[in-house]
Image (cartoon, rainbow, N blue to C red):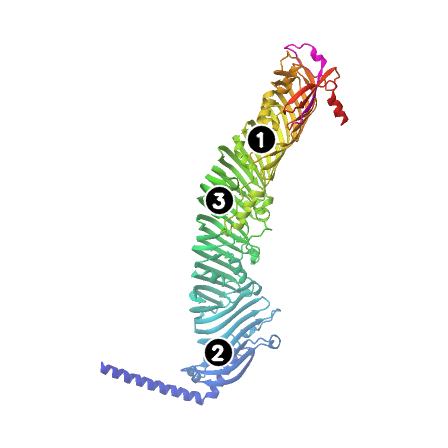
Amino acid sequence: MKKFLNIAFKAFKIIFVVLLILYIAVYAYVSINKASIIKQVTDDIGKKLNGKVTVEDVELSFFSQFPKVSVLLNNVSISDSMFAQHKHRFFHAEHLFARISIMLLIKKQAPLNGISIEKGEVYMYTDTSGYTNTYLLQQKKDSTAGKGAESKNELKSVKLKEVSFIIDDRKKEKLHSYFINDLNIKLDENDVSFLLDVKADIIMHSMAFNVPRGTFLKEKKFTGKFELAFNKQSSQLQFDSIDIKLSGQPFNLSGRFDLKGEAPQFILRAHTRNILYSEGKSMVPHRIDSSLSLVDLDKPLDVDVSINGPLNGGEPLIYINWVVKETHLKTPFLDFDNASFTGYFTNEYVKGVPRLDPNSVINNSNFSAEWRGMPVKSGNIEILNLFEPVLTCDLESDFPLTKLNDIAGSNFLQIQSGEGSVNLTYKGPIEKNNNTNSFINGTVSLKNGTVLYAPRDVSMKNVSGQLVFKNSDVLVKNLRCVVFNNKILMQGQAKNLLTLINTEPGKATIDWTISTPSLNLSAFIFLLKPGKNITAPSNSKTKLASAASNIDEVLEKAMLHVNLDAASLNYKKFEASNVNADISLLSNKYIINNVSMDHAGGSIHMSGSLLNQEANYLLATLNTSMENVDVSKVLDAFDNFGQDAILSQNLDGKLTAKINASLGLDEDGNVLPASVKSTIDFSLKDGALINYEPVKKLQNFLFKKRDFNNIRFAELRDILEVGNRDIKINRMEIQSSVFSFFVEGIYSMKGNTDISIQVPLNNLKKRGADYNPENVGIDKKARSIFIRGRTGSDGNVSFKLDLFNKYRKEKQGE
């Protein structure tokens, strides 16, 4: 082993001595021929370059790139013929090392085989008129060479250190600006192509194909070691699957640059995996970054990029696609958890249309995520026109209805159970804009739900049906539920609701149709009471709080136009059939547009309003017409209209009447008698007065042998005026089976009764059981006696003869 080491050491010394001798010989040769070498190298450079070349100083550098010999040119500048006007030197370097081959020098051949540039700049400039200094790139023709001869490239390497490289095309608004920290290129030439082995460390200040449209890869660091190929015949530079890094993020690139022809083109493809969303956005122009910033992701994604277009200016075609898995996704509308989807961006949505923001699109597909614990899916999410972004998407979900409580945050509607499904499409601005319409289409289906309307403490059970969205309208279809044991089927629509809910929710109008086989109106007496004051929890500060507040405002303040159809209806003692009601419900007022029903053998039509003026007091105004109804049943059903002059058990017959009334009600729907004010224009046919005590009292001094218990009479017609608990009876003719008389005056429920009864003397004629009374008219003159009824000291009405008709005289003297 020792012997082997001694032999190796001796060999190494011999080789070293030989190399040293050779190097000394080279050094001696170079030193002796210094002047001629410098002249030969500078002449060789001058033959290859166009333009005005200036060199401040030239020297031979033997040790700077040891062991290779170089000619050092200090402060080298190359400028074009128009430099005095535009002031941009085509080339400048503080130090340019021209590496030479000693063997080629000895052979008297062009010795230059490498260039190294330190602290320099290459500036390719084109002004707005189209003039460019890039003509300097054209190789000088050797005048001494034969026709068609081509100069062979002897360069084997190019090194750049701290060199700026700029392409500034003012005509085509293109700017590429790169600062080369370190670039080492090894060249290998054959008959067909150049092969370039590259090691690069570059800062990319700007990669703008169209300056007003922004720059790619702004201030990104480009590093990598890779190979390029340049085909000399086609003037095509290409590379395939090279690995580089941009700001430390690994990318794989493939590309081709066609440098020949009238319209040279380029194609560039890039792939990266697990890149942060924020980092990926920073590599595209600001306008695209702004559009992509409408959403945010918290996990890396996989991205593929394709860019191709003209090299001589113009907007390239951009196509970016991505794959996202189980990320937290933030959007202007909603935030999603565990979101997975694929998508793409392109600036050419419609081919042939300029590649600008209005023709750009962001598209996501195969979207699945969770929203507040609800699974959601979407087949397509698309954002068109990035100048004024418009979102189009579909959304599907199946979920427990109780999830809507946290989502909507409504204090009015509280969902207690049930199942729901959503199938919606949306089209509208991606950011909230009250001046732009948003359109939602699709359905929300409900099944087996229980919903509490908190302000009225009303529970709707077995809720099922659909909410249908059409543009900005909302429709309710076949909504079935049970409320206070009333089976109800509801349909509804709210025109333009989705626009008004964000602008003026209190101005929304909801058209609602209710159908039921049987309705117990007593169960809905709560509608007469003010709703509970429901306030939002103090910690309910969510993104949806504003929307929930608007929903509550719609439910509380919007006008609800209701059409009710009920086969039967009852309220306390009132019963009706074939009920149709057209009612408008405002926040504190119910407007009865039209109500019709069959009741007591006839029909009733009604209009009016119900106003909640103050606590425990509602003001009702009614315009009612009755056709051929059983008067006894009407009086009984309406609690004798708050009077006790004639009660239901005292009167029989078929009533036709027009009633204009205003009255007060308490929260339980009871009439406040003192508040009643009305006029009643009525006709009563086939009438009978049964056990009516005030008339029976007349029997004390009139027709004592006649039957006052059941008095049949001809048609009664009159206009009664009710007010302040008084009933004014205008002169009314009563032709009855017992006797005929005329009555007028005030019947008072507060002790002010004053009634005059005129009894014609022809009543003395005997009337049999078959007597058929007939009206003669209120103006018919006849001999009569007068009876006056007044409230006595005991509070009861007592009747006395009014021999001199003082009632009329007092009335005329008023």
Disc on the earlier residue, 3 or 1 = 3
| Mark 3 residue type | Asn
Secondary structure, mark 1, is strand
Q: Relative to 572, does residue 299 appear above or below in the rendering?
A: below
Disc on the earlier residue, 2 or 3 = 2
Q: Relative to 104, does residue 278 appear above or below in the rendering?
A: above
What residue is pinned by disc 1? 580
Which circle, 2 or 1, is nearer the viewer? 1
Q: Give the range drawn in magenta.
A: 751-774
Seen from the viewer's position, the closer of residues 534 and 304 is 534
Q: Relative to 4, does residue 304 appear above or below in the rendering?
A: above
Q: Which mark is residue 423?
A: 3
Q: Which residue is drawn at 64% across and 12% down?
A: 706
Quadrant housing the C terminus: top right
Image location (x, y in percent) of residue 809: 76, 23
State the CA–CA distance, disc 2 to disc 3. 65 Å
Seen from the viewer's position, the closer of residues 679 and 38 is 679
What residue is pinned by disc 2? 118
Image location (x, y in percent) of residue 171: 60, 67
